[in-house]
Image (spheres, grey):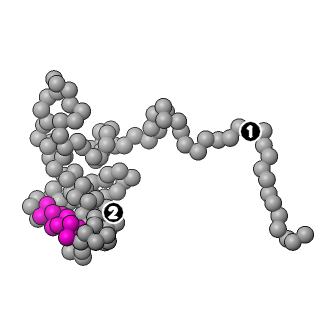
């Protein structure tokens, strides 16, 4: 022959699904920094709060504020590579303003915060080619 071979797999085993059915519970819970189960992203508005829900505590308000940096870094720089550079530059300025406007402790906590897929604000920022000062501020926070 020509040296090429064909390999086929013959088995009596049923095929193994590549993903779990949507009805299965998530086998890996998402734990927040404080060890509580739940998403690292916290809702900004009243979503998910019932009519009788208590108002947010100071710690949840702080958590929401710390989550803002993750959101800003995820959206900053968007548009730079598709001709909307001014939008991207404005986003980086929002990141700078947030970092400069918060205490060193809050900046550190926010910079270490993990979001979806265990990403930090630095991971999200680096997807959009951040300015050097943004990288420096996030690394040293």
Instruction: Give residue 25's quadrant in the image.
Output: top left
Relative to the observer, which residue lies in front, 78 or 18?
A: 78
Q: What SS does tag 1 mark?
A: loop
Is 119 on the left-hand or right-hand side of 111? Answer: right
Q: Where is residue 81 in the image (x, y as percent from the top left)?
A: 32, 71
Is most of the magenta stretch helix, strand or loop? Answer: helix
Give residue 13's mark: 1
Question: How many numbered discs, if any?
Answer: 2
Q: What stretch is highlighted in magenta?
A: 86-99
Residue at image position (22%, 35%) is 47
Please name the residue that numbered disc 2 is placed on. 123
Residue at image position (15%, 56%) is 106
Residue at image position (40%, 40%) is 29
Q: Residue farthest to the front?
A: 83
As displayed, is residue 12 above or below residue 104?
above
Residue at mark 1 to residue at mark 2: CA–CA distance? 41 Å
Q: Position of residue 99 (x, y in %)?
A: 15, 63
Q: Where is residue 89 in the image (x, y as percent from the top left)?
A: 20, 70
Is 1 on the left-hand or right-hand side of 74? Answer: right
Q: Residue farthest to the right?
A: 1
Relative to the observer, which residue lies in front, 91 or 126?
A: 91
């Amino acid at each position: 022959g020509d040296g090429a071979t064909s390999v086929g797999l013959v088995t009596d085993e049923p095929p193994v699904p590549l993903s779990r059915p949507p009805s299965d519970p998530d086998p890996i819970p998402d734990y927040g920094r404080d060890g509580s189960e739940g998403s690292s992203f916290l809702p900004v508005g009243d979503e998910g709060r019932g009519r009788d829900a208590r108002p947010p505590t100071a710690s949840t308000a702080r958590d929401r504020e710390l989550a803002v940096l993750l959101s800003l870094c995820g959206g900053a720089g968007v548009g730079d590579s598709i001709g909307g550079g001014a939008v991207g530059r404005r986003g980086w300025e929002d990141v700078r303003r947030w970092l400069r406007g918060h205490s060193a402790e809050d900046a550190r906590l926010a910079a270490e915060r993990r979001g979806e897929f265990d990403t930090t604000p630095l991971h999200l920022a680096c997807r959009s080619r951040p300015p050097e000062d943004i990288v420096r501020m996030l690394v040293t926070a």
